[in-house]
Amino acid sequence: MAKYKLTKDPVTGEELPFIILGEGAFIPKNTDNTDYQDYLDWVAEGNTPDPAD
Amino acid sequence: MSTLKVNKIRDTSGSTDAITLDPSGGAVLAGVTTMTTARITTGITTSIQVGGGVTISESGIEASGIGITCANINGTQISGRRNLVINGAMSVAQRGTSSTSQGYHTVDRFKPYAGGADENPTQAQVDVSSGTSPYTEGFRKALKITNGNQTSGAGGADYMQIEHKFEAHDLANSGWNYTSSSSFITLSFWVKSSVSQDFQIVLRTTDGPSQSFQFETPTLSANTWTKIVKTIPGNSNITFDNNASQGMAIYWFPFIGTNYTSPSNTLNAWVQSTSGTYGVTDPTTWWTTNDATFELTGVQLEVGSQATAFEHRTFGDELALCQRYFQKYACTDQEWIYVESNGAEYKWWQSHFNPMRTTPTVDISGLSTGSGTSFAGGSGNISSIAVTSTSGGDANGRVSYRVTGSATWGTARTLHHTDSWDGEFVTYSAEL
C-alpha cells in the first residue's frame, strides 16, 4: 500500500483534486500547501500513489 | 595641583553669578549651561531631577505626569506587536499536550522532529514551575522534549530539532532592513536542559540562496532555566519574498549529528546555507542520555538591537494567530446535511472560521462511520465521508463533503452520530 492514494467522488466517480494521506487526510492539489509539496517530492523520488477506489 | 578657593564665579562682563559654590561640596549653576558631553563615570549615587516629574538614577529614568516624545524605542516601533514569533509562550496546544509522533502534535507553531532515533523522543506542553523565573516573568507553559533511549549512540545523521517557521512577507514587512549589517533583529528565549552542555541554534532563510546564522548557547547549568539573548545583524545576501511561503526558520537542536555540522563553521555570522551549516560540532551528552529533557518558552524575535520584555498576548489573540495555520472543528452528535433529490448524494459543509495561510489539508481520520451513525428520518448508517472541495487562502474557507449511506431524499436532515461525535474532530492544516 502506497503512502498516498488518489481520490474519486464516491457518487459521481469523478476524480477529485485531492490526494489522500494515511487514514483520511485530504491534501488539496495546491502548490502552496506543504503537504502537497511533500507529495510532489515523494512522486519525484519515483513513487506512485494508489489509484482511487 | 592647587585649589582655587572662591564662593562664586561671574563672567567679567556679567551682572549675575554663573556658579555659586556650596561649602558642602556642591555647586549651583545659574542660567543656561552648555556642554558637549556630560559623562558621569562613577554612577549616579542619588539622582538627577528635572522639576518634580523626571528622575534619572542608576536604576533608570522615571517620568511621571508628563509625556515622552521620541522617534522610536529600540530602533523600531514604539508600541503594537513586536514579537514575530507566534505562540512563543507555548500557551496554545490545539492538537494535544503529549505525543511521541514527529512534527506538529502539541504546541502550535513549534515542530519537534527527530532523525535517526532508536526511540522517538516525547514532545509535551508542560507547566512552568512556580516561584522562580520564567514563571515570575509571566510564563505558565513550556514545550518539553524528553529524549528516548538512543541505544545506538550519537550517529552522524542523528538529530533532534525544534523548528519555528516564519512567512516570508511577515519578515519582508517587519521593518528589519535585513540587507543592512547595521540593522538588527534580536532573538530571546528561556531554555532549560537536564544535561549541562551548550546547544546549537540556527536561523535559516529560505528565499534566494538560503543563508544561515549559527550560534550556540553558553554551557547551561543542568535543570536551570536560562534566558538567552542573541542580536543578529542583517546581511546583503538575505532575501525575503513578499509572499505567504516560508521565509525563514529558527532551529533549536537538543542534538545535531556531525553530518550537519563542522568544527570550522563560522558562528555568529550569516553564511550561505549548505547541508552542513547547522552549527559546530555538538556535544552528544543530551542525545546519549535516556530521558534527558530540553524545555523552551518565552521565544521572541523582534526588530532592533535590544531584547525587550516579552510581549505577552491574551490566549485568544494567540489562538487566532495560530489558527491561520491550524484549526479544528469539534463535531457535535448532530450535523446538518442536505439530501439531494436523487437520493444518493448527501452533502455536508463546514467553514473554517479564520482565513488560513493557504487551502488547508482536511483530516477526517478522527471521524468514525458505520455503526453508531444514522440519518434522522432515514435508515442505515453512514458508510463513508469524503472531502469533495475546499476553499481558503485569503478568505474564510469552506469544506464540502460527500456522505454516503441511506436516507430519505429531498430534504435537509441531520446526520446523527448516535454514539456522539463529541470528542471527534475535523482538522484543517495550512502549516508552513
Image (spheres, rainbow, N blue to C red):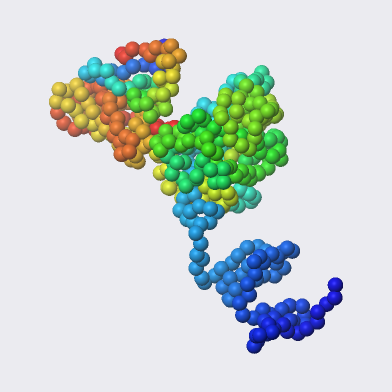
Residue B367 is at least partly visible in this image: no
Considering depth in this image, is B333 or A30 the residue closer to the camera? Answer: A30
* Percent position of residue B361, x then y: 37, 28
- Whether residue B197 sits left or right of residue A8 in the image: it is right
For this orientation, the residue located farthest to the right is B1
Considering depth in this image, is B413 or B418 the residue closer to the camera? Answer: B413
Task: Tally the numbered discs.
Answer: 0
**The N terminus of chain B lies in quadrant:** bottom right
**The C terminus of chain B lies in quadrant:** top left
Residue B272 is at least partly visible in this image: yes
Q: Give the residue drawn at x 52%, y 47%.
A: B303
* Percent position of residue B398, x then y: 29, 34
Q: Give the residue drawn at x 83%, y 77%.
A: B3
For this orientation, the residue located farthest to the bottom is B15
Considering depth in this image, is B346 or B159 the residue closer to the camera? Answer: B159
Q: State the image quarter where residue B285 is shown.
A: top right
* Percent position of residue B358, x then y: 36, 33
Q: Give the residue drawn at x 36%, y 37%.
A: B356
- Whether residue B12 sits left or right of residue B189 in the image: it is right
State whether residue B306 is above or below residue B206. Answer: below
Q: State the image quarter where residue B297 is shown.
A: top right
Q: Give the residue drawn at x 56%, y 52%.
A: B308
